[in-house]
Amino acid sequence: MLMEANAAIVMMTPLLMPLLTAYKIDTIHFGMIMSMNLYIGLLTPPVGVCLLLGNTIGGGQFSKTLKEAIPFMLIALVVLLLITYFPPLTTWLPSL
């Protein structure tokens, strides 16, 4: 299923909200996980809309742009793992 981030948020959040309440998952934490997953999806091929757009604006070769974007993809994956398995990273500020 290929869709833009806004459409995915609007369509999937109401579907997943009953599961969040049933399993007592914090909605802010879920929102951060969903946002990071969508960001990674927009950055990585085969769809990679943001990567293709940046390449088009920059006017470079796609292979070079992809090679330069790999560190950002890895950082995003590490951040996703951290916020997924350590929820206080995303919930400490709203709980103040």
Image (cartoon, rainbow, N blue to C red):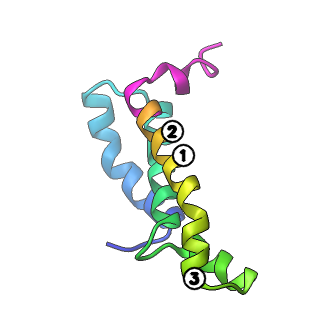
Looking at the image, which residue is at 54% across and 80% down? 63
Check whether the beta carbons of the residues at disc 2 and disc 1 lie within 8 A of each other.
yes
Nearest to the observer: residue 77 or residue 41: 77
For numbered disc 2, what is the local secondary structure? helix
Magenta stretch, residue numbers: 83-96
Q: Of the numbered discs in the image, which one, if any, rests on residue 62?
A: 3
Queried whether the magenta region covers residue 95, the answer comes back as yes
Q: Amino acid at mark 2?
A: Val
| Neighbourhood count class around disc 1 (C-alpha, 10 Å): few under 14, some 14–19, many 20 upward | few
Check whether the beta carbons of the residues at disc 1 and disc 3 lie within 8 A of each other.
no
For numbered disc 3, what is the local secondary structure? helix
How far separated are the C-alphas under marks 2 and 1? 6 Å
Marks 2 and 3, the one that precedes in the sequence: 3
Nearest to the observer: residue 90 or residue 18: 90
Write down the quadrant of residue 41 in the picture.
bottom left
In the rendered view, would you say 50 is above or below 22?
A: below
Looking at the image, which residue is at 38% across and 74% down? 2
Check whether the beta carbons of the residues at disc 2 and disc 3 lie within 8 A of each other.
no
Write down the quadrant of residue 84 in the picture.
top left
Q: Residue 53 in the image: state x and y as whole percent.
A: 64, 79
Q: Of the numbered discs in the image, which one, if any, rests on residue 75?
A: 1
Looking at the image, which residue is at 44% across and 52% down? 37
